[in-house]
């Protein structure tokens, strides 16, 4: 049975710290799915998650490259952004995901963090963790986490 946990982050730093704390419990094969409107803080979350994995590289949105790979001290982070693939539709098909090598990364050594994961929800394993980030004020965010 899944359970919903809601966390309020009042500042960008709160969001970064929340994500960094979550990353410290991450393990090989984890899949973290992020959804939320443009500007909700998905990339900020990814930056905090990378800090928690002790990744020293600057983490940027992979909007135009679709995937960025970062090596941390203990885990590799595979950071996907599916937004550009869905500019004309709100759903991706199997062939599109297969063509970008998406399935090759699911469940491998490291952690997959997927922005705009809702566009591929039909193809994401049931054990994935889903987070929806909502803007509540200028800097505050509400993060609803659905744990499998």
Image: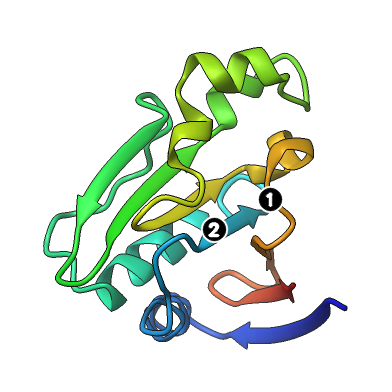
Left or right of 63? Residue 138 is right
Q: Which mark is residue 125?
A: 1
Q: Is residue 103 above or below residue 7?
A: above
Residue at (66%, 86%) from the top-left corner? 7
Q: Nearer the viewer, residue 43 or 131?
A: 131
Dot 2 falls on a residue whose secondary structure is strand
Kindly check if marks 1 and 2 are in contact, taking CB atoms under 8 A apart as contact.
yes
Instruction: Determine the CA span between mark 1 and mark 2.
Output: 8 Å
Few, some or many residues within 10 Å of mark 1 (<14, 14–19, 20+): few
Q: Nearer the viewer, residue 122 or 7?
A: 122
Outermost residue toward the front in this view: 108
- Place residue 97 in its image quadrant: top right
Sequence order check, earlier mark of 1 and 2: 2
The C terminus, quarter of image: bottom right
Few, some or many residues within 10 Å of mark 2 (<14, 14–19, 20+): many
Residue at (65%, 86%) from the top-left corner? 8
Q: Is residue 143 above or below residue 33?
A: below
Residue 82, percent from left and from top: 56, 32
Q: Is residue 95 above or below residue 24?
A: above
Residue at (68%, 45%) from the top-left corner? 124
Residue at (72%, 14%) from the top-left corner? 88
- Place residue 95 in its image quadrant: top right
Instruction: Tell us which disc is closer to us: 1 or 2.
Output: 1
Q: Circle 2 sits on which residue?
A: 31
């Amino acid at each position: 049975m899944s359970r919903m946990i809601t966390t309020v982050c009042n500042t960008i730093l709160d969001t970064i710290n929340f994500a960094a704390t979550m990353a410290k419990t991450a393990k090989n094969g984890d899949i973290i799915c992020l959804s939320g409107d443009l500007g909700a803080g998905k990339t900020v979350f990814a930056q905090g998650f990378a800090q928690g994995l002790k990744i020293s590289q600057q983490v940027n949105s992979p909007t135009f490259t679709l995937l960025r790979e970062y090596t941390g001290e203990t885990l590799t982070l595979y950071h996907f952004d599916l937004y550009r693939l869905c500019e004309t539709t709100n759903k991706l098909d199997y062939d599109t995901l297969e063509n970008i090598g998406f399935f090759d990364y699911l469940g491998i050594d490291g952690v997959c963090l997927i922005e705009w994961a809702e566009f591929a929800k039909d193809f994401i394993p049931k054990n994935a963790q889903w987070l929806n980030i909502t803007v509540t004020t200028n800097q505050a965010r509400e993060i609803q986490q659905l744990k499998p």
